[in-house]
């Protein structure tokens, strides 16, 4: 029996996914949550074989959840099920040790088959995404990504500097470097480019 935990913030989709997968004779859904923080707590208690997670959720994102589980429980398999066909997201997911990356319009029987393959130790990636995953390399450093994410949330240089315990001039330099690397005109355009590529 393959045990699953589902993390998805769209309630209707979460319920439908659980119902469809429960129809499979060798799959059991142990639990489900609509946000990453709840999922992380419950997964630690339930210890499923596989976690199936969306990327964008309230609180902890699916990629952050995958990174935590990779460090805390490396034997647990994580599958990302998402609407976002962004190469940057796939690259980050693979770096976080994710064993599967599939698009939400994957038919239920194909998803069940993919889960069985992953449970056997295989890695399953949506074939179209696999072709484009490494065409677009993320040019940003981790600090540039962190600062750009905060700038995209509307924080000023001074606010970012206070939050990250940096000098305001240092924040300006990081933002300037990120804007230059992304060939953007300003911080908001740089944030949009990075977000659309899945680099944030």
Image (cartoon, grey):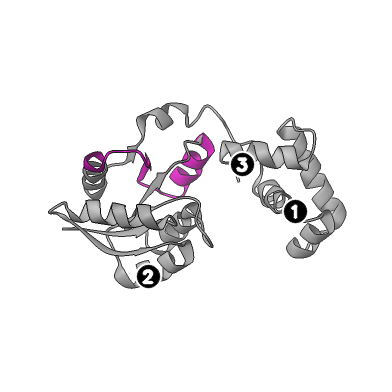
* Res 31 → quadrant: bottom left
**Upstream in sequence: badge 1 or badge 3:** 1
Q: Which residue sits at x=60%, y=46%?
A: 200
Foreground: 58 or 87?
Answer: 58
Residue 88 spot, x, y in % from top left: 53, 38
**Upstream in sequence: badge 2 or badge 3:** 2
Q: Which residue is mark 3?
A: 195
| Residue at disc 3, secondary structure | helix
Which residue in the rendered view is the most extreme toward the bottom?
45
Foreground: 118 or 128?
Answer: 128
Bin the neighbour count of mark 1 within 10 Å (Cα to Cα): few under 14, some 14-19, many 20 and up. Answer: few
Q: CA distance from mark 1 to mark 2?
A: 33 Å
| Residue at disc 2, secondary structure | helix
Which residue in the rendered view is the most extreme toward the right?
169
Residue 188 spot, x, y in % from top left: 74, 42
Start-end of magenta stretch: 87-110
Number of marks: 3
The N terminus sits in image quarter: bottom left
Foreground: 25 or 93?
Answer: 25
Q: Which residue is mark 2?
A: 42
| Residue at disc 1, secondary structure | loop
Residue 104 is marked as none
* Res 94 → quadrant: top left
Question: Can the viewer see residue 52 in this picture?
Answer: no
Q: Which residue is mark 1?
A: 154
**Label 1 close to label 3 by CB (< 8 Å):** no
Q: Which residue sits at x=23%, y=52%?
A: 21
């Amino acid at each position: 029996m393959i045990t699953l935990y589902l993390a998805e913030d769209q309630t209707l989709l979460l319920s439908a996914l659980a119902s469809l997968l429960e129809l499979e004779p060798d799959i059991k859904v142990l639990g489900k949550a609509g946000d990453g923080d709840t999922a992380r707590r419950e997964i630690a208690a339930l210890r499923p074989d596989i976690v199936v997670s969306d990327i964008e959720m309230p609180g902890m994102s699916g990629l952050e959840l995958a990174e935590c589980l990779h460090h805390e429980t490396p034997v647990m398999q994580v599958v990302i099920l998402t609407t976002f066909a962004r190469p940057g997201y796939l690259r980050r997911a693979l770096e976080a040790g994710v064993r599967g990356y599939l698009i939400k319009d994957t038919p239920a029987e194909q998803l069940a088959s993919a889960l069985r393959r992953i449970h056997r130790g295989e890695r399953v990636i949506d074939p179209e995404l696999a072709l484009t995953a490494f065409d677009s390399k993320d040019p940003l450093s981790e600090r540039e990504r962190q600062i750009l994410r905060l700038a995209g949330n509307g924080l000023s240089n001074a606010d970012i500097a206070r939050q990250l315990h940096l000098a305001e001039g240092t924040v300006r330099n990081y933002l300037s470097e990120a804007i230059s690397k992304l060939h953007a005109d300003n911080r908001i355009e740089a944030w949009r480019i990075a977000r659309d590529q899945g680099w944030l």
